[in-house]
Amino acid sequence: MTVDAVVDVIARSATEIRQGLVGRRGTVDAENPSGERQVEADVWADELLAERLLALGGVGEYASEERPTVEGDGDGLSVAVDPLDGSSNLESNNAMGTVFAVYDDPLPAPGTAIRAAGYVLYGPITTLMLAYGGSVTEYELSGGERTPVREGLTLPAKPVVYGFGGRVPDWPEEFRAYAREVESELKLRYGGAMVGDVNQVVSYGGIFAYPALDSRPEGKLRLLFEGAPIAHVIETAGGRSSDGSRSLLAVEPDSVHERTPVHVGNATLVDRLEAALD
Ligand code: AHM
Ligand code: MG
């Protein structure tokens, strides 16, 4: 019941968050716990979601990419949120999203403790991709209502697209070699917001990665707010996730803002990635 209530709050808030982006594109004089410059909309969406989710009786913890500590009395489910994923796309007015996961355990918890996870995509249409109860459903969101449009969704068997983050010269040698193979087989689709890029993979099949970098072996994306929730969606849709050697859902986090390399998509492509990095 509480899981449904959490999903409802996020779905209902999403169209408001989208509206509220207008006039909130500027940066604020602050950094998030990962050391990244925040935009006004990051801070605003985080506060809106924190207030509404913590007001639900069964939610004991709220953690977000935009605040250093876990909030709440600890009594109930834990919700981890990236309030605005890809917010650097706000300046150029490109796709962005909201990512969330509902964990059974206090945070930081591994992805195996996820009860439901999903993402909102602020594209031409606002959609919610939800993995819950063993299946994935895509909803269209409008004015607080959600309408299922694709149910029991699985990744298309034949992969078509790929999108890899980070600068090519900063990719480790083995990843570069893997990318060379993939780019001869698939079409590049990269927009700089994980949610948008992952949704291309969910829609057409393929692989998304923000790999380990030479300058940053831990990668860029955060396990609790980005890696594990997306891994839960992709694995529920029949795909695979990996930190380079194992499922992102198997990683036991030491801290709430821990980063991880992220690779998600069709199982054949993630299997090959792991073999290439081995
Ligand atoms: P954010 O949550 O602070 O917006 O950062 C995450 C985003 C992802 O959406 C995207 O995959 C990645 O950062 C892109 O990073 P970069 O702009 O460094 O290529
Ligand atoms: Mg993010």
Image (cartoon, grey):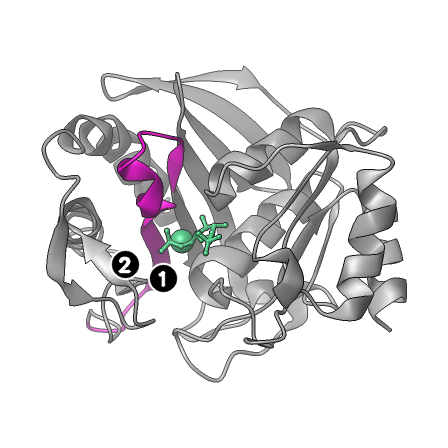
Percent position (x, y) of residue 159?
81, 32
Magenta residues, start to end: 73-97
Tell whether label 1 touches label 2 (CB within 8 Å): yes
Mark count: 2
- Look at 52% across and 25% down and name the residue there: 138
Question: Residue 59: which numbered mark, if any?
Answer: 2
| Residue identified by numbered label 1 | 77
- Look at 24% across and 76% down and name the residue there: 69
Residue 14 belongs to magenta span: no
Q: Is residue 23 left or right of residue 37?
A: left
Is 246 above or below relative to 191?
Answer: below
Q: Quadrant of the N terminus?
A: top left
Q: Nearer the viewer, residue 94 or 1?
A: 94
Mark 2 vs 1, N-terminal side: 2
Q: Is residue 113 left or right of residue 158?
A: left
Is 252 above or below relative to 260?
Answer: below
